[in-house]
Image (cartoon, rainbow, N blue to C red):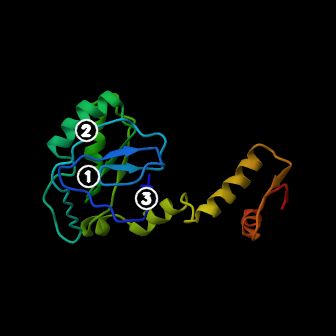
Amino acid sequence: MQVVNKSERAISLEANGQVVLTPDQGQEASSEILPINFDGLAKNIATLVGSLFTLHASQIHIDLPTLTEKDQEVISSWGVKNKIDFLSLSYTRHAEDVHHAREFLSKLGDLSQTQIFAKIENVEAEKVFNQDLYFKRTVKYVGEPMTHLESIASSTVRAAIKVKASIIICFTSSGRAARLIAKYRPTMNYLL
């Protein structure tokens, strides 16, 4: 979602002010109304109070449980009600943290099959977990970063293969799109 500011003038938002987000991109952007390029905008009113402050402490030992009492309370109520599929454990330090989380989820019945993602975010965890092995296992399933055009070309070839298309027709002025389609080795012919 991006603000559409056709005038390209700076827009200043005031603290405790109200801003209307609208999918009507014909509106002029101002401090009261911001046109955005998102048609699925939900109609909602929210008040943002205060500032958000995040502290990332990766180089020090923090003597706090991975799952606090508040976390357990939220998981027991909201998590069970919504049947969460995944639980992301921040600041996991030991394998026991994961075992304790699994034990806790198993006691909740409906969440016994919930998958746990243990995030390795501090020095303690790096000493315990084999980060290289973890990285290799994870990266095996992750594609390389690509541009928007590359993503379209890759998806085009995969979709054409999936539906057993006999040809891919590509309109291009520079030839770049055609080269990108060729890069993903379509099994069918392509017409430029």
Estimate the x, y position of residue 95 in percent, counting from the top left.
Answer: 29, 55
Q: Nearer the viewer, mark 1 or mark 2?
A: 2
First in sequence, mark 3 or 1: give its number.
3
Which quadrant would the C terminus be assigned to in this image?
bottom right
Which residue is tagged 3?
5
Task: Kindly indicate the quadrant of the structure image that contains residue 127.
Answer: bottom left
Residue found at x 74% / y 62%: 181
Left or right of 192: which side holds 121? left
Which residue is tagged 2?
104
Tag 2–tag 3 contact (CB < 8 Å): no
Dot 3 surroundings within 10 Å: few (below 14), some, or many (20 or more)? some
Which residue is tagged 1?
96
* Label 1 to label 2: alpha-carbon separation: 12 Å
User: In the rendering, which numbered label is found on residue 142?
Assistant: none
Residue found at x 29% / y 37%: 105
Residue found at x 45% / y 65%: 135
Task: Kindly indicate the quadrant of the structure image that contains residue 9.
Answer: bottom left
